[in-house]
Image (cartoon, grey):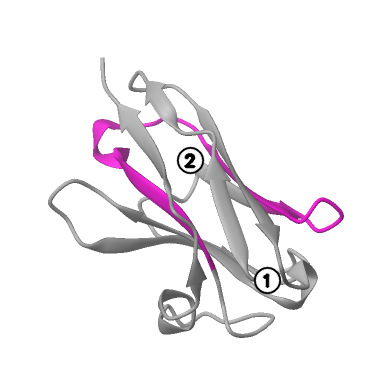
Amino acid sequence: EVQLVESGGGLVQPGGSLRLSCAASGFTFDDYAMSWVRQAPGKGLEWVSAISWNGGNTYYAESMKGRFTMSRDNAKNTLYLQMNSLKSEDTAVYYCARAFGSWTSRYSDYAFGSWGQGTQVTVSS
């Protein structure tokens, strides 16, 4: 069975950094594009970033560009999200999601794919 397990969340001060990981199993990891999606308290789902099967293509939402960096290590079946210059509005549950294909820039291809349980990120002083 497909499993996606997020980790690395926690409490961090504004301006700080955090690195999230997503451990994947139950499928051929390097066959799929992957994504990070988040949900802030009282808000809807927001697409954070996406990466192609080999890391050759990436997407970032405008508010994350220059602050967040997505990467993957296919040998370890692991996805990463390095978050810098964190703001209070980054407080959310962060999910990793598997797309239907090896690369797609369509959010729906991630939204309707497989998701993990999420990891809580809280940015507060």
User: Is 27 located above or below residue 55 in the figure?
Assistant: below
**What's the magenta region?**
71-97
Three-letter amino acid code at the position of disc 1: Ser
Judged from this view, the residue extending furthest toward the left is 42
- Viewer-nearest residue: 99 or 6: 6
Residue 2 drawn at (x, y percent): 62, 69
Residue labelled with disc 1: 52
Residue 67, disc: 2
Residue 33 drawn at (x, y percent): 64, 73
User: Is 88 located above or below residue 37 in the figure?
Assistant: above
69 with respect to 56 (left or right) = left
Residue 116 drawn at (x, y percent): 49, 58
User: Is 125 located above or below residue 103 in the figure?
Assistant: above
Judged from this view, the residue extending furthest toward the front is 1
Three-letter amino acid code at the position of disc 2: Arg
The disc, 2 or 1, on the residue closer to the chain's N-terminal end is: 1
12 with respect to 33 (left or right) = left
User: Is 36 located above or below residue 88 in the figure?
Assistant: below
Q: Quadrant of the N terminus?
A: bottom right
Residue 7 drawn at (x, y percent): 54, 39
